[in-house]
Amino acid sequence: MNQTGQGRTVVDVEDDASVIGRSAREPERFAAIFDRHAPHIHRYLARRLGREAADDLVAETFLAAFRKRQQYDLQRPDARPWLYGIATNLIGQHWRDELREYRLRQVLVAERDEVSHADRVAADVTARAVRPLLTSALADLAQGDRDVLLLIAWEELTYEEVAAALEIPLGTVRSRLNRARRKVREALGHADPTTTFEESLSNG
Amino acid sequence: MDDLRLVRELGRDTPLLASDELAPARGRLLAAVAAAPTANPIGANPTGAQPTGAEPTGVRPTGAERRRRPGRPRRPVRRIMLAGWTAIGVAAAAAAVLVLAPDKIGGQVPPANAEAAQVLHNAAAAALGLPDVEPRPDQFVYTKSRSGESMREAWLSVDGTRDGLIREIPAGEVEETPVPGCRDGRAATVKGGRVNPRQTEPCTPAPAYLPDLPTDADAMLDYLNRSYKGEPGDSNAMGKDVLALVAENYLRPRSRAALFQAAADLPGLEVVRDVKDGAGRPGIGIAWSSEEKSAVLVFDADTYAFLGMADTLATLEVAVVDAVGERP
């Protein structure tokens, strides 16, 4: 056992499935799953619900994972999509917090922009300029569409991993992503951020 | 600028925490780990409720299972797949109706709301008046639903082996998503919205009609609990099961009635007045009185027909047709 807890790039470490399998008889092994994945799961929760809620729910996620470790599909060497699925379910129960977080972020971003505007490069300025639109577009998405979009855009899961995480068919991942992206584009379209961005580049 | 890139930028500000900042959460996990009894080996099916190979036929597998290679051992989690998208909101409410986890509601189970139960009993009675059709394996379950301005039609194979289609029309523009049938353990892959019959992936069939569903309330509740292997109180997961039954599958009238009746027997329901479904149709709402009242089932106040979910979903039509593209 050469578990170092330094992440999944370490080569001679048991894969997650093996750790989870052994954790049935030796529960303490499950700590390795936390060490490997908690930073990413925490960041995902913080992105969607804010830091405070994430601090609490990252523990909830791993407690839930630990409780249902016997249901883990041992054919899957990497447990991260499974953990994302559990975290996403918890987020679903805190959707009010999520919407509040996006609203809050709009305000914060607007304030931050005023002080730092001049220092930013064009791309960053544009990205910031469209943030209020983006956050409100995210807030307006159906929960399931938002789950798929953010697991792909923020967490860089593949379509297959999203399907496994959310236990939905691949076709549904695609259709949810299409719809989410279209709605985001529509929301941005009114302000035409593309034009603003291109212009600021060519004029700047 | 690419919309995905912009969304990605939005996530950039949030840092990955160092392990010491995660120490409190790790401590909570370790405390639970220390308290855990040494369990059965994983895969030993600790509940014994659903021995491998004796599962009800026709239960729709999860996405994960659809890609499971044939011959691999089944994993103990067995859920009904949710083919639809409009359903997420429904999930929470419908699940909350059926899963009672006293530990999640402070140890107190509130008494059943008689009026809410009556609405569900009426809905069950109304369901019995629906036309009874026994679908053939080669047919398709057609559903038409609406969520705000977005229309959705789906043709899903009754036995899961035929190629189906989901057609969505959000604001005039048609988006089609093929649903390849699963034949001999393989299904065609879909890339860029098109089926590629030359490339296949492992699958198990996802039937749109479950021929062996119970027809009385007790058996239905038992069935739901049996086919549900998620964590107790995981309303989202259980809701997907229930929602798939109500909104995406064809249920014969007696099973549909049993489902509503099973829900009516559980405490914690309440009536929500002046609600509208996803198409703006007014009705009477049934909600779960937890603090997370995220969705409300809507029934017609006169006929008690199931309409959909408050503000998110209107189920307009469910029928059995002979071919993709055919409407009742």
Image (cartoon, coloured by chain):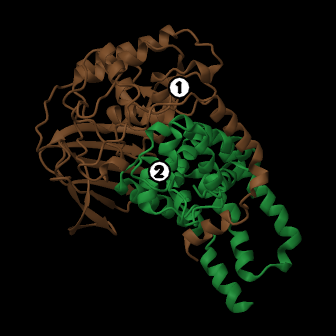
Secondary structure category for the residue under label 2: helix
The percent position of residue B127, horizontal first and vertical second, equals 28, 21
The vertical placement of B37 against A142, above or below, is above
The vertical placement of B258 against A136, above or below, is above
| Chain identity of mark 2 | A
Instruction: Give left or right: position of A200 versus A177.
Output: right
Q: Which mark is residue B274?
A: 1
Secondary structure category for the residue under label 1: strand
The percent position of residue B275, horizontal first and vertical second, equals 51, 29
Q: Which mark is residue A17?
A: 2
How many numbered circles are shown? 2
Q: Nearer the viewer, residue A127 or B314?
A: A127
- State whether residue A106 appears in this view: yes
Which chain identifier belongs to the green chain? A
Instruction: Please give the name of the residue rendered at 41% of the width and 20% of the height, measured from the top-left corner.
Output: B301
Q: Quadrant of residue A37?
A: bottom right
The vertical placement of A200 against A45, above or below, is below
Instruction: Give left or right: position of B263 versus B128.
Output: right
Q: Colour of chain B?
A: brown
Gap between marks 1 and 2 measured at Cα: 49 Å
| Chain identity of mark 1 | B
The percent position of residue B5, horizontal first and vertical second, equals 59, 72
